[in-house]
Amino acid sequence: MSAYAFPIGQSTMLPTMSSSRSFMPSCYPISLSPIGYMDLSMPRTPLAPEDAARLHMDLPENPMIIVAALELEGALDHTELLALLRERLLGHARFRQRVVESTFGFGVPRWEEDPRFELVRHVHRHLDDGRPLLVRVAEVANRALVRDRPLWEMHVMERALGDVLVARIHHVVADGAGLVRLLRDLAGEPPPQDRSVQSEKRKQRGLRVRRLVGGVAAATRLLRSGSDPRSRLTGELGKEKSLCASATLSLQTLHEAARARGVTITELLLSSIAGALRERVGGRVVHALVPVALQTRETDAGNRYISVFVPLRVALEDVGARVRDVAHELRELRAHHQSISSGVSLTSAAGAATAVIERAGVRLFSKRATLMVSVVRGPEHPLRFAGATVRDVTVWAPVPGTIALGITLMSYAGRVRVGLNADARVVQDPELILSDVLRELSQSSA
């Protein structure tokens, strides 16, 4: 079988579960613009260290905004959707609060209730204009989130084949796992209690100093390990991104392939990416920045993860050898906690330095990797809200710092979609990269 609608030829692929109503797996550029800051005088709660870290990963070239497109069976009732969001989404305090930076970026950013909050300012409806769906998704993904209000918005795109709900949520509000929990809430689980951010209210100056010292030590260890080599996937970023999406794939097929090789789906995907990037990075070892979830409460909607740098030995041509190598490397990282401890130290240092210093650190930190790879485990059964069943979900996770390429695999109701976002200035063939990843994934699953 072939990758869904790629105009580059046919090759054996994983079984797809898509129809003519699925996403066009093409790439469309989007423009990005900087986000401003405000300093207002109201009662505020300091951001937790990990949340401040995600906030300061936000750069003009790479805004930290999660984009999720939910294809629906049928039309969304707009009034019912607004009522649902009021009842269930706004039970999460972060969706009512804005983030306020201190003057000149000194001190810890803080949450505060938006005194002018109106739900209708965050929910937009778009008439069907006949353009391909992914073109419309890329267009709304272009928009900067306004910093004088909570950092999220939803767009309902009308289509004859079924509406699409596009959610854009800043990473400071929720990570991938938090997004999944929010979707479950919207689908009908008991409404959440008020989950105001429980920041550490530690005022001791010594604690802040210890965080900063720990972060500096962690950054020093990472810098000593060197940057990834320059390649066709690295360079000075522009302000346009390209979005690509695969057809739906069978989750069962991926699970069976991973079990047969004694690995996880994440390890299988990383191996496939390594094979797809061989020629693009000159056969040299590069690193993938891979988020690893930390244990957290089931109701937590925030950021509870750190990232590890997984080496990809792209020169290994044998599929089996490459899969085993990636699995070994990722398990060694987890076992020895080296990258994990560095990640924890760096995020715990957030708020100990100024925003300017933290953003400079993000740029240095991100040079250690060539791409970011995220795997999000979604709901196992179809969700339904606002009068419509969610048929498919595609997610494009943000990438930090100077990284030009991000790949996100999202499972949902027995299906899988792979989303790719790339800097249009650096990455010239994003659609072909996604096609090559799917081809390698198919070979790994054979």
Image (spheres, rainbow, N blue to C red):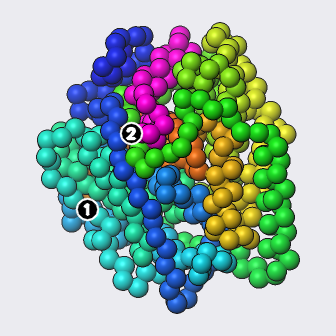
Location of mark 1 (residue): 124
- In the shown orientation, is residue 340 left or right of residue 306? right
Callout 2: 10 Å neighbours few (<14), some, many (20+)?
A: many
Judging depth in this view, the residue of 108 and 280 nearest the camera is 280
Q: Is residue 146 above or below residue 19?
A: below
Q: Which residue is pictured at 50% across the width and 48% down the height? A: 398
Judging depth in this view, the residue of 148 and 326 nearest the camera is 148
Sequence order check: which comes first, mark 2 or mark 1? Answer: 1
Location of mark 2 (residue): 243
Residue 440 within the segment the image draws in magenta: yes
Q: Secondary structure at mark 2?
A: strand
What count of labels does the image hold?
2
Q: Which residue is pictured at 74% across the width and 71% down the height? A: 352
Residue 116 within the segment the image draws in magenta: no
Whole-percent x and y of residue 404?
53, 40
What quarter of the picture does the N terminus occupy? top left
Amino acid identity at mark 2: Leu
Whole-percent x and y of residue 410?
48, 38
Q: Which mark is residue 201?
A: none
Judging depth in this view, the residue of 180 and 112 nearest the camera is 112
Q: Which residues are magenta?
A: 418-446
Q: Which residue is pictured at 59% across the width and 57% down the height? A: 57
Callout 1: 10 Å neighbours few (<14), some, many (20+)?
A: some
Q: Is residue 133 above or below residue 64?
A: above
Q: Quadrant of residue 231?
A: top right
Whole-percent x and y of residue 55?
57, 63
Q: Is residue 444 visible?
A: yes
**Mark 2 or mark 1, which is nearer to you?**
2
Amino acid identity at mark 1: His
